[in-house]
Image (cartoon, rainbow, N blue to C red):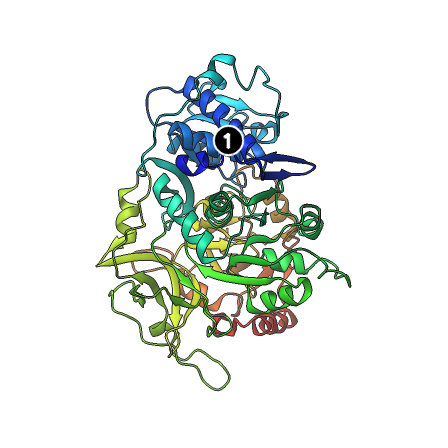
Amino acid sequence: MAALLRTRADDDAPGILFEDRAWTWRQVVDESERRAGLAAALRRPGPFHIGVLLDNVPDYLFWLGGAALTGATVVGINPTRRGQELARDIRFADCQLVVTDTAGAALLEGLDLGLDPDRVLHIDDDPPIDAEPADLLTEEAAAGSEASERAPSDLYLLLFTSGTTGSPKAVKCSQGRLAGIAWRAAVGYGFRRDDICYCPMPLFHGNAIMALWAPAMYVGATVALTRRFSASGFLADVRRHRATRFTYVGKALAYVLATPARPDDSDNSLREGFGTEASTPDRAAFEARFGCRLVEGYGSSEGGAVINVTPETPPGSLGLPLPGEDIVVCHPATSVECPPALFDGQGRFLNAEEAIGEIVNRGPAKNFEGYYKNTDGDAERVHAGGYWTGDLAYRDGAGFFYFAGRGDDWLRVDSENFAAAPVERIVERYPDFAAVAVYAVADPRSGDEVMAAVELHQGATFDPEGFATFLSDQPDLGTKWSPRYLRIMEALPLTATGKITKAGLRRSSWLGDDPVYWAPDRRSFRYRLFTADDRIERTQEFSRHGRTALLPS
């Protein structure tokens, strides 16, 4: 990545667009060298890890460039994490510096980061290109920005994902692996020098870095940043920057489609969008409304398995593996390959228990570089002769893959992975709950929704308004973590050893005889009883989006 950045040192084409400002690639390299100098001047013994807690602002890309030049590792810090969970991420990743702004500093206030206060750098969103404020750079630091040669094996990124243990895992990505991704994405998805690549997905996520920033830099295209994703601002941003391509994850398309349609929506510069996990109806509606071709692919920051949509891919399918890749669906307990899925004339899944398994790459896991300080996580991925993705799927008779959810305790909401245990620990604080189980249930459009089954203390009754107020008062509750559904049970199901078992809860989801409360509007989380009419409407919504096979049973 250092070598790739240096190819832009004399490039006067636009490199970054942000709000009403622009930087050439030459200026991007200059700014990256200044950050490299500052990082080198502040380096201490130990892992050279720099946490970045920023919105999608130019400084984020300057620090990515600076880290590449000086051999540092950027740790993408997720601002939707809160409290001790956020502090834990920074400490776990051995960050010796944290780069943030006023909003990020407010999230960090009072937390034990394992750092002296002067190791948290407060960067204004965007200092002028000809300015060198004293709190950002010293003359000595700027003079020391000359970087030594980097090696492809240099650790470049730590990207937090989530595992089944409840603690996030930090995916390792070297400079060489990301440079290879940049080349493959640029060539495979047709990036062009005159592209303007709109980046609405967060830069702490692999989608924005691997599918947009890196390939854009490879061909010398322009990156157009927005601070954070905004459905209402999407088309205005596209038009302002004359963007030709963008990336998305999950329900981002659905949120854009929910904005009021206008007759001139297709009057825009978009040529192509690339993403994952959008529903088939949402993709079709987006293409029709905005006149933009969408391309889907399956992959992960770990890089262990890739599945791409082909021209023959049926609606709702992930597609097929790349030629020569031995990617299958296996039963997690036996490692035996699962049989194809069978459906009746109404599309009902006849052999879900047999056909759904984990996506496994039985070839060499050459692109998986492991998790940081997590040998158990490495073993969870690479074992029994293959790379196990942790994602569930099934295949049809022609071999096409269909996503079926995450592993036991994983949830994926609005493209964000997280585990159940941290959510359970928070919900368990509610004084009327004696026991709590949190698990994923299918979202009718894409990914998962959060559901909790709770057992009340004797004599207690469930207060929907009180519970909503309780959730809003929890400082460490992630922005995606609040339960959409709550099942009120007399007793949670237990194994013979007294452990709560969730398998039946997941299957039944919002069906059954127990009272279920839900929040029809996820933004407000005002809970009310889930009625028979709600059940019918939800069922119809699954059908509209081609996810009938994931309905509760």
Give the mark count: 1
Left or right: residue 472 compared with residue 77? right
Q: Nearer the viewer, residue 167 or 199?
A: 199
Residue under the image location 61 percent in, 27 percent down:
102
Residue under the image location 50 percent in, 23 percent down:
34
Residue under the image location 45 percent in, 47 percent down:
210
Q: Is residue 112 visible?
A: no
Q: Amino acid at mark 1?
A: Val
Residue 149, percent from left and from top: 34, 29
Secondary element at tag 1:
helix
Left or right: residue 424 compared with residue 247? left
Residue 239, percent from left and from top: 70, 50
Q: Nearer the viewer, residue 280 or 109?
A: 280
Residue under the image location 50 percent in, 56 percent down:
190
Which residue, as the protein is rendered here, is positioned at the far left?
385
Q: Quadrant of residue 527?
A: bottom right
Label 1: how many Cα within 10 Å (few below 14, some 14–19, many 20+): many
When the figure is inspected, residue 110 is found, relative to residue 171, above or below; the finding is above
In the rendered image, the quadrant that contains the N terminus is top left
When the figure is inspected, residue 143 is found, relative to residue 343, above or below; the finding is above
Residue 351, percent from left and from top: 37, 77
When the figure is inspected, residue 489 is found, relative to residue 353, above or below; the finding is above
When the figure is inspected, residue 553 is found, relative to residue 173, above or below; the finding is below
Q: Quadrant of residue 113?
A: top left
Which residue, as the protein is rendered here, is positioned at the far right?
263
Residue 466, percent from left and from top: 63, 47
Which residue, as the protein is rendered here, is positioned at the far top?
140
Q: Is residue 305 visible?
A: yes
Q: Badge 1 is on which residue?
A: 29
